[in-house]
Image: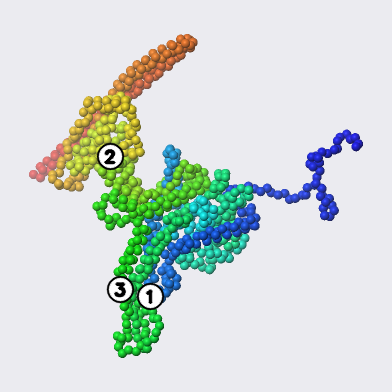
Amino acid sequence: MADFPFDLELQPDEYDEELPPIETLPDGLVAIGESVQAPQEEPQLREFDDNLAEDMSDEELLLIAKDLIAKYDVDKSARDDWMSVYEKGLLTLRPEELGEGTGAATRSSRNMSTVHHPLLAETATQFQARAISELFPPSGPVGTVILGEATEELQNQATRVSIYMNYQLTEEMEEYFPDLDQMLFHLPLVGQTFKKCYFNPILGRITSSFVQGADLVIDADATSLATAMRTTETIRITSQQYDEYVATGFYLEATTATEETTSDDAETMAQKVTGITTPASSEDDMVVLREAHCYLDVESKSEPNKPFVVTYFADTQQVVGVRRNWDVEDEKRFKKQVWYVSYKFLPGLGFYGYGLYHVIGGLGKAATGALRSLLDSAAFANLQGGFKLKGRMQGGEIEVAPGEFADIDAVVDDINKAIMPLPFKEPSQTMMALLQYVVEVGKRFANTADMNIADANQNTPVGTTMALLEENARVFSAIHKRLHNAQRQEFQLIAKLNGIYLPTKYPFRMKGVEDSYILAKDFDNRIDIIPTSDPSTFSSTQRIAQGQATMQMENAAPELYNKYVVHKRMHEALRTPNYEEFLLDPLDIERMDPVTENTAIMFGHPTKAYSDQDHKSHMIVLDNWYSRLPPEGQQLYQNQYIGHRAEHMALLYRAQVQAALGAPLPPLQDFKNPNERPPDIDPTTDAKIAEAAAHVINNSAQGQKPAPLGPPLPKMGGDKQPSPLEQARLMMQIESESIQMKTKADIESKMMKAQMDAQIKQSNAQMDMQIEQIKAQAKLEEARIKAQFSAETDQQKATAEVELMWAKANADIQIAREKADTYLQGEMARINTQIAMEEERTENQMELDRAKARTDQHIRLVEAHDKAEEFNDDD
């Protein structure tokens, strides 16, 4: 090899990396390098709720649709027996002329009865009426419970959630009440209904819709919606609505003509039962979809199947939607999201529940047969029928309807021999008793939630009535508990959707509530959302009986109950609308002066004594007002007077004990608040308070009732009632004297306050002396400790610290003395000013009264003089 200035030998890795690929083309040319291809866009990551069907091939979607349709047919055939009873249950509401097909037509052609006994319809209607009032009360169906310790933050959160969800269900979700109302009518007849909670992209909000049991097919092995492998719903919408879903990107555009729909799913079970058919002109406008909640291996072939929601056309097998159906935060992605809620009337032997037709459908048929038999026999007995001769007799069967005479070919010479009425019997008493027994047995099971209190003995104790109600209502109480639990699941689904789709802060307008808003984070796991209905009481009669029993026990032992809470619970049991407007809350009583308190007592308004009021003055004014009332008035206001005076007396007694003790007493409990509990005190404090109270009792004459201030009002003789004019005069006199008493009481209270201020100053001076002694002792102890400390450490540092502490202590003492002197001087100046103002106002008032008296006297003298002159002129 020739010598080169550099090495040209290529290593294997360099050869593979640098040498471009060489390819011989069919035309003999050689292509060196990579082929030039159009750049490809990298696939974009989809959002969690996007429609995955947009990225899937038609072949893959078709395989999914065929598999789901085959499994749907298997699941649907597995419940054929239940669907047969389902249809028969709805047939009990069908018009009588269509109720039995050709049999009804045959009976009608023979003038026989085709009536149906309304046993099942009546019980279903009564159940629906009771259930809708319990599950959707006027105040709103949603309540909240705080999980854990009830802090102020959690209480505010629970209040916001409750207010918003009640507003959401009653105002925003217009379909909620009609769907719930219709569902509760279907439920007792068929035994199983469903509600679906989801976000509607067309409406742009959350919705909860009623799904009939016939339109939701569950796999045969399922025991609950959560464990079901497949849940397939038949959805019927118009082509206009489908186009709107396509416009929002929720569904794919239909590639096949939907107007050629021939599926039986196009007609609902309600249309089949009622006989209402869709006009031919509108058949093309119907779009029938199936929404399957199932498990598929769409995204990862190597992992187990994941939960998805697949929507496809029932006829053309075109898949228009594939979406993930697990929680975004679920890393394993095995647990599916359940957006359906199952409402059961009675639990069945499998997944589907039982209705009234399952358990008393035979009794309904027996009642219909017995009723028809009675009507037919009554018709035949009232409208006689038989045979009549028409010449020569001919054989064969002859049918006779009520009131009809059939022709008989025979020749007779006596008209009585030509006509023979058939021996129809009157309605049988045995059949009547059988009908009553069948109806009674049916209603005993289906209509035991309420008891007719009007028919019961009025002297029966409330406890006995409640026991009878609870015993009779066990069946429907169990049904109501199932409804309560299902509605709770529905509310929790709606709350979960609120946390997903609501903005961070969502304001809304509600009557009577200003600046209402809800936060998306409010719908977390700290608040449990429950229905407001009581799962233990399904009957309004039972609820009212419980309230009456509570009121009776409260009357027997009023010291053990809160009267306001008892009356509040009774109004809630009665479902009284807006009872807060007239039921007075004892915790919300405003502060009043003594004159206003008396007026409030006269008008029946509650009063309350506050601890910082002048209780002596209040009692003086109260006693004077009460003593001036006539006997009838004293008897009328006696309870309110005694109760309010006792409040002031108790608070005055507390203030005296506190002054005798020389220290503040424990905080006073609000005894009218049932949620407040008295604070615990230690035995030492208890003994001191008892000693101070005994000292007050031994050295005070406060317990003596003050004498009436002023002469009492004249009493009416016998039972004679004062006239309205006299009553008005008495009221004006009472009001005038009350104002005078208020003025006098104000002066006395201010004088008493001045005395109390002097006592307080004296007490403060004594306390200052005690503080000085304590400070001196503390300083001596501090000096001793510092001296010991200074001996062990640097003497100069210890001396400096002692001097600093002494200087600070002297400064604190000087500042405290200056503040005390300033406060005393200010109080003295204020008291002197008030006394001077009161004296000046009193002198001015006295001067004004004297001037007025002189003026009145002068006017009377002038009038007397004028009369005397007139008398002289007449003479």
Q: Indicate which disc residue 426 carries.
A: 3
The image position of residue 579, as x and y in percent, is 34, 48
Most foreground residue, 160 or 615:
160
Does residue 508 appear left or right of residue 655 in this picture?
right
Determine whether label 2 and label 1 are within 8 Å by CB.
no
User: SS for tag 2?
Assistant: helix
Determine whether label 2 and label 3 are within 8 Å by CB.
no
Q: Quadrant of residue 242?
A: bottom right
- Residue of label 2: 559
Query: What residue is shown at x 30% (from left), y 22% (from top)?
Result: 763
Q: CA distance from mark 3 to mark 1?
A: 17 Å
User: SS for tag 3?
Assistant: loop
**Precedes in sequence: disc 3 or disc 1:** 1
Query: What residue is shown at x 25% (from left), y 36% (from top)?
Result: 645
Q: CA distance from mark 2 to mark 1?
A: 72 Å
Query: What residue is shown at x 85% (from left), y 38% (from top)?
Result: 9
Callout 3: few (<14), some (14-19), or many (20+) C-alpha neighbours within 10 Å? some
Q: Indicate which disc residue 111 carries.
A: 1
Does residue 100 appear left or right of residue 593 in this picture?
right
Most foreground residue, 17 or 669:
17
Asked if one can make out residue 515 in the rendered structure from this viewpoint, the answer is no
The image position of residue 263, as x and y in percent, is 55, 64
